[in-house]
């Protein structure tokens, strides 16, 4: 069992990052259940200036894992709750109700939720229903939503257009669409979650991202998935957010600290913390 612990001491040479705060708005770092390895993951985050981590829920089983991490690092880790579209199976309504009743303390978003047609197109109706129910849940709590959208932009936008009002807001997690889709998401009140794909040679984001104001962007890793270059093909971790931020700074022809400051300010606007 991991007990509450204070932030680790920063190593010599940390002064470069001490004034810079990077925010990973989407990480599953809690998947690592080895206590020692998890301490190492968190230490490397702090070493790279990544001191704010937002943890999306995916199913009922992951709630306890999130709880362990937020209790171990209450100043750095912030929970969300939601049912991932790939978890919408069988009697999903019962599991969703159990997730809603879960206690993770202060909740900062409903997510990750949405539509995924990469793995299974046969349960679209159930995915849409679960998506809408969770949007309603978020609105009732005054919280943002964090959207998972894979091979389902048309279907996702259709739901969002139906649900559009002053309460609908959040993040398009792991945004990999085109410029038109990016602008459509922004017009609906969403920020774009930019992760490791931005570092890929054929990722496509670098072709238009500079045309999007930095005020509409947040950074993420989706750890342990989608590792950025130079770690592509290996397990991702939140400390690698530094590579995403560096690439974004390169695209916008600005410095790393500017990217960190603006994207962290955006995350505070979204999550309220």
Image: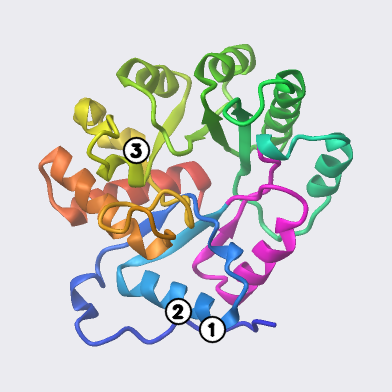
Residue at position x 71%, y 61% in the image: 105
Tag 2–tag 1 contact (CB < 8 Å): yes
Crowding around mark 1 (Cα neighbors within 10 Å: few <14, some 14 to 19, many 20+) is few
- For residue 260, say whether it is visible: no
- From mark 2 to mark 1, how far is it between C-alphas? 6 Å
The image shows residue 220 at horizontal and vertical percentages of 41, 49
The image shows residue 141 at horizontal and vertical percentages of 70, 39
Crowding around mark 3 (Cα neighbors within 10 Å: few <14, some 14 to 19, many 20+) is many
- From mark 3 to mark 2, how far is it between C-alphas? 28 Å
Query: Which residues fall within the magenta stretch?
Result: 56-84
The image shows residue 215 at horizontal and vertical percentages of 30, 36
Does residue 125 appear left or right of residue 220 in this picture?
A: right
Does residue 125 appear left or right of residue 39 in this picture?
A: right
Q: Which mark is residue 217?
A: 3
Q: Which mark is residue 120?
A: none
Depth check, mark 3 against mark 2: the one in front is 2
Q: Which mark is residue 36?
A: 1
* Magenta run includes residue 224: no
Q: Which residue occupies the foreground of this view, 213 or 246?
A: 246
> Where 197 sits versus 51, above or below?
above
From the image, tell me which residue sits under label 2: 40
Residue at position x 85%, y 34% in the image: 90
């Amino acid at each position: 069992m991991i007990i509450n612990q204070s932030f680790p001491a920063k190593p010599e040479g940390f002064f470069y990052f001490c004034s810079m705060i990077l925010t990973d708005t989407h990480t599953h770092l809690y998947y690592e259940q080895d206590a020692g390895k998890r301490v190492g993951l968190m230490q490397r985050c702090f070493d790279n200036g990544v001191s704010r981590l937002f943890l999306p829920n995916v199913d009922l089983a992951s709630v306890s894992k999130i709880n362990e991490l937020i209790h171990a690092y209450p100043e750095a880790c912030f929970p969300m709750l939601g049912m991932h579209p790939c978890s919408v199976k069988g009697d999903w309504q019962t599991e969703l109700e159990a997730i809603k009743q879960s206690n993770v303390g202060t909740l900062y978003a409903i997510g990750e939720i949405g539509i995924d047609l990469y793995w299974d197109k046969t349960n679209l109706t159930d995915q849409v229903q679960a998506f809408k129910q969770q949007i309603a849940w978020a609105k009732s709590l005054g919280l943002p939503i964090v959207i998972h959208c894979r091979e389902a932009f048309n279907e996702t936008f259709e739901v969002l257009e139906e649900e559009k009002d002053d309460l609908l807001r959040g993040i398009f997690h792991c945004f990999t669409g085109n410029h038109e889709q990016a602008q459509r998401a922004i017009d609906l009140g969403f920020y774009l979650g930019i992760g490791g794909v931005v570092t890929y040679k054929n990722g496509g984001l670098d072709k238009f991202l500079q045309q999007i104001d930095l005020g509409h962007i947040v950074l993420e890793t989706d750890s342990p998935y989608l590792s950025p270059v130079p770690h592509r093909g290996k397990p991702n971790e939140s400390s690698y957010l530094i590579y995403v931020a560096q690439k974004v700074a390169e695209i916008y022809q600005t410095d790393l600290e500017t990217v960190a400051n603006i994207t962290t300010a955006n995350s505070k606007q979204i999550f309220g913390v």
